[in-house]
Image (tube, rainbow, N blue to C red):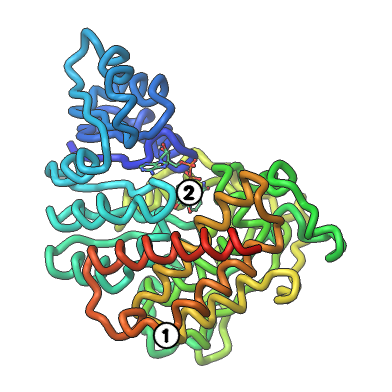
Amino acid sequence: MRRVSIFGATGSIGQNTIDLIKRAPDDYDVVALSGARNIAQLAKDARDLRAEVAITADATLLPELRDALAGCDVEAAAGPEALVEAAARPADWVMSAIIGAAGLAPGLKALEQGASLALANKESMVCAGALVKASASQHGGRVLPVDSEHSAVFQGLIGEDMAAVERIIITASGGAFRDWPMEKLASATPAQAATHPNWDMGQRITIDSASMFNKALEVIETREFFDVNPDVIEVLVHPQSMIHALVGFNDGALMAHVGPPDMRHAIGFALHWPERRKLPVERLDLAALSQLTFRAPDETRWPALRLAREVMAGGGHTGAVFNAAKERALDHFIAQHIGFMQMAEVVEEVLSRLSDQSCLTNAEMTLDSVLAMDHLARNTADAVIAEL
Ligand code: NAD
Ligand code: MG
């Protein structure tokens, strides 16, 4: 029996993970499941999977969670500290699928107790890649990519020599506004941005797909995960989302990972690694698909991609600032305080205002230093938005 915990269990990645676990319940001993506001879903899954503990990130919802778990022996807990305490409970495999920088502390704690960390929470790598990697190597754990592009690259690198890698190409669908005329983008609404042509994901990452902030985070995540030079990484717009990534080698070969847009492939690969097991995903009929198309991304339409390169050049805490400014800009876009194209303007201005902070690139990285920069960047983003 493998002991597993799922942080962000009620979200899109969390529910896909639970779908796989529920197909083989005798193989897993579920330790912790976490959610935030969807208490009914959290309690149902905790009961079904006989979890040891269920945690809501929202401390005010503890009484509701206790009520929902009444009569069964699942413990109830709440608040950010309880999340970290739950991540300290011994587990073999931990899914990190909280959205945003809030996923960092529980993920690091899971690595500290020696678990393998399946990392959907790309923000952890963007904000604190050095810490995540150091913690994994210090405690004998392993970080396994769950983002579809990174899982594809990881699979493309099995048995290969990193010194022979010339290119890593991650694809992007282009999101909701790929074919919109530029002049319409300024007035795009959150509801319009929250629809995705191919993937069924949470609201925030779907909007980040339309702005390509998601791809910008993934470019930085690629650099951190595979320890490659930023020049090696390319983004390719591929509207069908069937090829997730390609790895190019020094003999000219390009190895592509092709599969249906179903996150259960990448989650299942991380769950069973280093084995491959049968997964309930569609088998592609390439003849029926007939056409896969590609185009270069336009950085006027998607300025986030240009900013990602600045972030990689900055290094240190620049990723934490970029992510936090993006999270705040997204909050304000969802609240309709700022327009769609203003999100990138806000993030660029925050990066510029904080660029002279010596702690941005020089300071030693700790969880506290990352959280302090995250806090500063959120406040700076709020100040920038208030001045607009
Ligand atoms: P989601 O919004 O559907 O779910 C987020 C989960 O985090 C929920 O369980 C929610 O309750 C919890 N949560 C929200 N705020 C929290 C907080 N402050 N503290 C603790 N928990 C909180 O998100 P998602 O689409 O499942 O994405 C989760 C992560 O996986 C993100 O980092 C995203 O970038 C990444 N990812 C998602 C997909 C996808 O297909 N959805 C693909 C690749 C990567
Ligand atoms: Mg992805």
What quarter of the picture does the N terminus occupy? Answer: top left
In the depicted view, which residue is nearer to us: 271 or 41? 41
Q: Earlier in the sequence, mark 1 or mark 2?
A: 2
Question: Residue 238 placed where, x, y %?
Answer: 70, 64
Label 2 crowd (10 A; few <14 / some 14-19 / many >=20): many
Between 380 and 91, the one nearer to me in the picture: 380
Q: Count the marks.
A: 2
Residue located 42% across and 85% down the image: 356
Q: Give the number of the mark in front: 1 or 2.
A: 1
Q: Amino acid at mark 2?
A: His
Q: Position of residue 251 (x, y in %)?
A: 53, 91
Residue 186: x and y in percent read 78, 59
Which mark is on residue 356? 1
Q: Residue at x 26, y 37 (%)?
A: 79
Q: Quadrant of residue 6?
A: top left
Contact (CB < 8 A) between labels 1 and 2? no
Residue at image location 30% in from the left, 67% down from the top: 370
For numbered disc 2, what is the local secondary structure? helix
Give how far across and how far down residue 228 sits, in percent.
41, 83
Q: What residue is disc 2 on?
A: 265
Q: Quadrant of the C terminus?
A: bottom right
